[in-house]
Image (cartoon, helix red, strand yellow):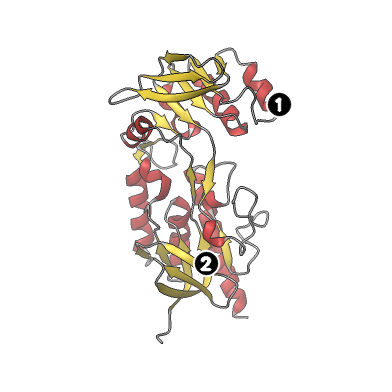
Amino acid sequence: MTTPEHHACIIIGSGPAGYTAAIYAARADLKPVLYTGLTPGGQLTETTEVDNFPGYPKGVKGPELMEDLKQQAERFGTQVRFGMVTKADLQTTPKRIWIDEQTELTADTIIVSTGASAKWLGLENETRLRMNAGGVSACAVCDGFFFKGQTVAIVGAGDTACEEASYLAKLCTKVYMIVRKSEMRASKAMQNRVKSIANIEILWDSETIDILGQQTVEGIIVKNNSTQTQQTLAVTGFFVAIGHEPNTRIFKNQLEMDEQGYLKVQAGSSKTNIDGVFAVGDCADKVYRQAVTAAGSGCMGALDAERYLAAQLH
C-alpha cells in the first residue's frame, strides 16, 4: 500500500479566505496545497461587479478578483489543485482527507475555508437573471449600491432580511418586503425597525412566483397565499435573504458547529475544537459575510497554523 502524500498545510476551499490563507502560509514557507472545491473562487465567481474590495478604485469583476488572488498565492509557491474534499478524518495525527472519494492525503494542519452557499427560491428566471448579472442578488450590502434611486424587492422574514431591507431603504426609493407567512421570524426590535421605515412596504402571506425581464429584472409576480390573488410589481432589483447554508457537512461530528452548521472558533482566533484545524471565511462567519472580512480571517488562519506548527517543534 502506498503512503499517502503528506503536507504541512492543506487549505480546503478557494474563496477570498482560502486564497489569502494560501498567500500567508506560502510566505511562511509552509508550502500549502489548496483544493479549490467545485467552484474555484467560491461565491465571488458568480458576482459580476465587486466595488467594495480595497485596492480596486474602479471596481473589479468577481472572477477577476479571484484570479488575482489565485495568482498571488501561486507566486509564493502555493499548489492550487482542482478537486473536492469528500471525506475528512481530523481526529488522527496527522489529519487525513480524501479528494473526490479516492485520493488520500495527510496534513499537519488543515485550514477549512469551504464557504457558505446562499439559499435561493429555485425559480427558473431567478437562476437565469442571477447568472447573467441581471439584478438578482443574495447580498444587499454588496449590490444595493447599483440600485440607488430605484424600486426593489426583497424576500425573507428573518433578522438578515430585515437588516438588508433597512439598508436598501436608505438607497432605494421603494422596497417591497415579501414575507411568506403572516408573521416574521425576526426579533421584535428588527421587525419594529422595518415597520417604522416609510418606504418599505411589507407584503404578508405572499410569495414570488416569477421574475420578469429578459436581460435585467423588470418586475415580479407576487401571489397572496390567503386570497390567492396575484399582482405584478415593477422592480429593477430582486434580493433573496432566506438564509445561507455553510458548506460544512463533511465535518459533522468532528468539528463543533452551531445549529445552522457554521463552524465554531475560539474568540479572536480561527482555532476550532481540534488542535491544528482552523476555520476561516463564511463557513465560520454568519454575521459579516464580506470578501474583505473573509480575506482577513484567512490571514488569521495561516498565522494560527504557522504558530501551531512552530510550537510542535519546541
In this orientation, which residue lies closer to the viewer: 281 or 241? 241
- Give the mark, 2 or 1, whose residue is nearer the N terminus: 2
The quarter of the picture where residue 129 lies is: top left
Residue found at x 60% / y 72%: 91
Residue 70 in the image, given as x and y percentages of width and height: 36, 56
Is there any visible trace of residue 304 in the rendered image? no
In this orientation, which residue lies closer to the viewer: 292 or 255? 255
Could you tell me which quadrant the C terminus lies in? Answer: bottom right
Residue found at x 43% / y 33%: 137
Q: Residue furthest bottom?
A: 1
Q: CA distance from mark 2 to mark 1?
A: 40 Å
Three-letter amino acid code at disc 1? Ala
**Label 2 belongs to which residue?**
110
Q: Residue furthest right?
A: 188
The quarter of the picture where residue 196 lies is: top right
The quarter of the picture where residue 145 lies is: top left
Helix, strand or loop at disc 2?
A: strand
Residue found at x 53% / y 42%: 244
Residue 209 in the image, given as x and y percentages of width and height: 43, 25
Q: Is residue 272 above or below residue 67?
A: below
Could you tell me which quadrant the N terminus lies in? Answer: bottom left
Three-letter amino acid code at disc 2? Ile
Residue found at x 46% / y 29%: 239
Is there any visible trace of residue 121 in the rendered image? yes
Around disc 2, counting alpha carbons within 10 Å, would you say few (fewer than 14), some (14 to 19), or many (20 or more)?
many
**Label 1 belongs to which residue?**
189
In this orientation, which residue lies closer to the viewer: 312 or 39? 39
Around disc 1, counting alpha carbons within 10 Å, would you say few (fewer than 14), some (14 to 19), or many (20 or more)?
few
Residue 217 in the image, given as x and y percentages of width and height: 35, 23
Q: Is residue 11 above or below residue 147?
A: below
Q: Is residue 248 above or below residue 138?
A: below
